[in-house]
Amino acid sequence: MHQALLVPDILLEIFAYVNTIPSTQTTSTQKLLAALARTCKIFYEPAMDLLWTEIHGLEPLLGC
């Protein structure tokens, strides 16, 4: 992994950019954030934080 990805500010900028996909593609954004969360330990926290900022209904929460 490149050393730049170990800097928290850079990592947060990358995930914030991923999260700016237009709302018509919300499902794609959620799938992408979930895939990033599964990629490595360093990606897990920021991706999960963005993934769970908006919960649509109780189904995702009850699925946990």
Image: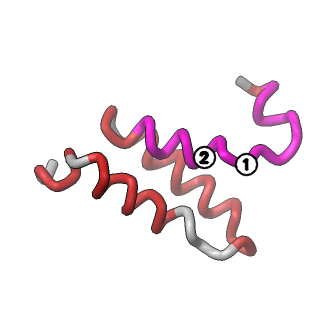
Q: Quadrant of the C terminus?
A: top right
Q: CA distance from mark 1 to mark 2?
A: 7 Å
The answer to whether residue 42 is left or right of residue 6 is: right
Q: Is 24 on the left or on the right of 38, as rendered?
A: right
Q: Report the magenta residues as a range.
A: 44-62
Q: Residue at x 15, y 48 (%)?
A: 1
Q: Which mark is residue 54?
A: 1
Residue 24 on image: x %, y %? 74, 74
Q: Secondary structure at mark 2?
A: helix
In the picture as drawn, the residue positioned furthest to the left comes out as: 3
User: Neighbour class for label 1 at 10 Å: few (<14), some, many (≥20)?
Assistant: few
Task: Depth check: give the residue in front, 52 or 33.
Answer: 52
Residue 52 part of the magenta-drawn span: yes
Asked if the magenta segment contains residue 48, the reply would be yes
Rendering coords of residue 28 (x, y %)? 62, 63
Q: Count the labels in the image.
A: 2
Q: Are marks 1 and 2 in contact (CB under 8 Å)?
A: no
Q: Is residue 51 left or right of residue 3?
A: right
The amino acid beneath tag 1 is Glu
The answer to whether 51 is drawn above or below residue 64 in the figure is: below
Dot 1: what SS? loop
Give the numbered dot on residue 51. Answer: 2
Magenta: main secondary structure: helix
Would you identify the image quadrant in which residue 62 lies? top right
Residue type, label 2: Leu
Q: What residue is shown at x 28% (from left), y 57% (from top)?
A: 10
